[in-house]
Image (spheres, rainbow, N blue to C red):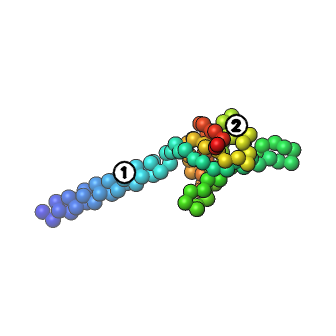
Amino acid sequence: MKKSILTITAIVIVLMGLQIGVCLAEEAQTSIEPATMALTGKVTAVKNDMGDLISINLLVTENAVETEYRITLDDMGKKLAEMDGMTVNATGTVTDVEGLKWLTITECTKQE
């Protein structure tokens, strides 16, 4: 009888551990999925001494909080770089890489 109770207790503990592991795995998976966002901010195109484009940033200010997004240097990102110094409306996929927010542009327009 005592052995049966210990066996049942061990099974319950193992099942609880598995359930916790599944919950943590689901939470980790949802936190890395990219999110599509529409943002408005000021474009900064950074060039090296030879004039080559090396990075693009979008500075977004919401509720007095500034957030900087690094822009993926693909064709749409380079289109955004042409709007250096301007305020733009940009839509794209946001991912977090090592604490930095990256935006892959799908659409961008100069704010009127």
Q: Residue at x 42, y 52 (%)?
A: 27
Q: Residue at x 61, y 59 (%)?
A: 66
Q: Is residue 72 above or below residue 31?
A: above
Q: Give the quarter of the figure containing the C terminus.
A: top right
Q: Amino acid at mark 1?
A: Val
Q: Is residue 78 above or below residue 67?
A: above
Q: To which quarter of the image does residue 50 belong?
A: top right
4 on left or right of 57: left
The residue to which callout 2 is attached is 79
* Residue at the extreme top: 75
Q: Give the quarter of the figure containing the N terminus.
A: bottom left
Q: Amino acid at mark 2?
A: Lys
SS of the residue at dot 1?
helix
Q: Which mark is residue 51?
A: none
* Label 2 or label 1, whichever comes before in sequence order: 1
The residue to which callout 1 is attached is 22
Between marks 2 and 1, how big is the CA–CA gap?
A: 42 Å
